[in-house]
Structures are given as C-alpha cells and as structure tokens.
Image (cartoon, coloured by chain):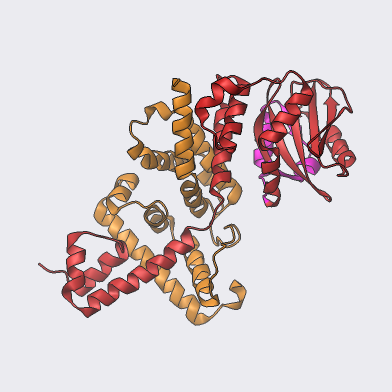
Chain colours: A red, B orange
Amino acid sequence: MSMSFSEFKKWLAADPLSREPATVRARQNGPEFEQAAVEEAAFEQKLSSALNFSLDKDALADEIIANAFTEQRRMPRWMAMAAGLVIVVGVAGILVNNMVQQPDTIEEYVEAHYDHDGRLLLTRADETVSQDKIRKIMASWDLEASPELAGRVTYIKKCFTMDGLGAHMVVRTDQGMLTLIVMPKTSVNDGQLIAFDEVEAHLVSLGGMSAAIIGRPGQPFDSVESLVRSGISKTS
Amino acid sequence: MSTETERKIRFEKLAREYSTDLYRYAMWICGNDALSKDLVQETFLRAWKAIDSLQSEKAAKSWLITILRREYARTFERKVPPLTDIDGVVIADEDELDPEDRLERKLLRKGMASLPKKYREPILLQVVMGYSCKEISEQLGVSKSAVMTQLFRAREMLKSKLQEDGVTGNVHELF
C-alpha cells in the first residue's frame, strides 16, 4: 500500500535522510512528494549546521588523552608524560617505551614540562574554568586556592611533577598569561630562576611544596608570586 | 606491542574520533562549556578505565554515549541550570553566512535550547551523533515508533519557533 502525503511528511520530519525503500518509493508518488523531500532536506541542512558548531578537535582530544593517561597511577610517570608529548607531536605511541628520559633536576623537569604542552595550554586564554573544578583538583592534595588566585585561573589540569601529580594552571595577568605549576611534594630553592627558549621560570618554595611560575621576561612575576605565596594553602 | 600500548592507542583513537561529537552533545544538554568539558572528560576517564570491556570498535560510539548519559544523570544533571539559550556558550562559527542564514541559525539554536529534554535528546542523537531511529530507540530504551513521533514533534516545534520568531521579528536582539 502506498504512503499518503501526510504520512510521508511525518516520516520525512522524523527521518529526513531515510533511505528505507518505502520512503524512496513514496518520493515518486508525485511532484508534491518530491518537493516536500527537497524542502525537508534543506531544513535538515540548516539544523545540522546549527547544532554541529565548530570546535578545535585536536585540542579537545589532546586534553582528554593527557588527562586520562595521567590519571592512571600504575603507569610510570615519565612514560605517561612522554606519551602525551608523543601524541602532541603526532608520533606513534608505540615508540614511547624506548624514548623516555626521566629528568634528574628541577631545571630539566620545568623545561620538559613546559615544552610538553605549556605553550599549547596558554592558547586557552579566553576560556573560563569553573571554581568547582579548581577546588576539586586542589583538594586532591588537601590544598586550596584563594579566591583572588582562583579568579585569575583560566585553565587547570592535573599534571606530572618530579614527585607525583601536581596542578598545571594558566593564570591571567594584565600583561598576558602565565603558566603556574603547583608541585605539592617537591622542594625547590626559593627564588631560583630558570631560563630557556625565551621564557623564564621563577621557583617559589611553599614549605614542603613548591610552585613554578613560567612566562616571558618582563611579565609580572612578582605579583603572581605574591598571589601564589598567599593564595595556596593547606585546607584546614 | 605491549598490551598497555595497545590500550593507549585504542583509547587515543576513540578520543580523536568521538570527543568533539560527545562535547557537542554535552553542550546541548548542559548548555555550559565548563560542565560539558567535565562531563566529556569524565566519560573518557571511565572509558579509559573500562576500555578492555569494549568488545568491538563498532560498538564504541554507543558505548561512549551510554557512559556519558549515565554520568550526566548520576552527577551532572542536578548541577545544570535550565538551558534557555545556547548562543552565549557555543564557539563562534568560522563559516561565512549571509545575515538571513545567520538569523535562521540563531533561531534554530534558540529553539533547540528551549525544547523539552524528551524531544531534544532524540534529535541530538540523530543530528549530532548520526544515530538511526533504531539506534536511538535502543539507546533511550523506547520503541522505534515512539522515537519517530518524538523526532517528528521536535522538528515541528523547531520549524514553528523559526516561523514565530521570524514573523514577530525580534531580529535586532539576536545580533
């Protein structure tokens, strides 16, 4: 039995791209059927275009992959970090086991970490991060960030440090974005400066923990440093 | 090749293939960039932990959307404010559109944001995730005929909103 025009219209609106024999046959029932199919296809194109908004596909996948791998604590830390690096540069993951060198010093760590994804994450400058996410990540080490510091964070994720996991943040300042790496179990020489590849890292000792503030020379390290000193503390 | 490396390569492939579709889906149900990213991240963290249970790559999309929907219902749904307008959260489109098409796109997005969840979810699965009516019925656990009805009504509502807003002419507040 052939499909009526009203049945056909209902079918089209439910499944405009249907290739089922009944709908394909019905299109040949008359010009109004064909016209309705063409109009529905045009609407569908507009709908698809409206719902499938643009996205930076690689950036999202990179973040998901890096976070998933760093969550897996069974895996050797520098292997995981190198896996992320390998993915970023598009090299096959199977090489990871053979190519990783664990850094021996804080200088090597900071440089390797920043090279890994530091520059990429600075491009998240316009994003906002929920205060809840900041709170949750910092709470992993019984830490908290002051509202003044948290209000400047535009990106945060867990990352590897020399001594387990830490937090990688991007912090907004009036002179651009700075990278802040919080290392909950690493001790550093307070005030040490590490320069590499046209950026510099300022190390801040915070008792048993530490932070590295990384940016271009001339950026307001001092103001972020005081925010870090007063803004990162153990939860009571 | 080690099992660990195989797992990582398999996971990476899933993340690269499905993360943006899942993020779009999450955006249309959460209407909030940060929550949507958290939801997708949580979905993939769960997928990573359970990746050995995925028998076939053909089932991956359905598996991931099932994890996402469960995670949304379990943790995220109560955090999400009512979705009224997606314009403030979608990323600016790069394609060039003339003003009329741009208006239609905005009206469609506004209409989509105001659809009841019952109608929004099947049409998202169809348009964003590329599901067939049969797959939608399996995912949502309702009959295929019920899905067809929901899809038909969803499109009718969208067309009606497009017409209403177009006719009443709130054009200026949309740009």
Q: Is residue A139 left or right of residue A193?
A: left
Q: Is residue A85 above or below residue B109?
A: above
Which quarter of the figure has residue A4?
A: bottom left
Looking at this view, name the residue that lies furthest to the left: A1
Q: Is residue A171 magenta?
A: no
Frontmost residue, A215 versus B84 = A215
Q: Residue at x 50, y 68 (%)?
A: B105
Q: Is residue A36 left or right of residue A25?
A: right
How many discs mark residues in the rendered view? 0
Q: Is residue B79 visible?
A: no
Quadrant, the C terminus of chain A: top right
- Residue B19, horizontal then vertical, whole percent: 49, 44
Quadrant, the N terminus of chain A: bottom left
Which quarter of the figure has residue A17?
A: bottom left
Q: Residue at x 57, y 29 (%)?
A: A83
- Residue A144, horizontal then vertical, whole percent: 74, 33
- Residue A215, horizontal then vertical, whole percent: 80, 40
Q: Is residue B30 visible?
A: yes
Q: Is residue A154 magenta?
A: yes
- Residue A161, horizontal then vertical, whole percent: 70, 25
Frontmost residue, B50 versus A119 = A119
Frontmost residue, A74 versus A56 = A56
- Residue numbers of the magenta segment: A127-155
Q: Is residue A152 left or right of residue A29?
A: right
Q: Is residue B93 above or below residue B130?
A: below
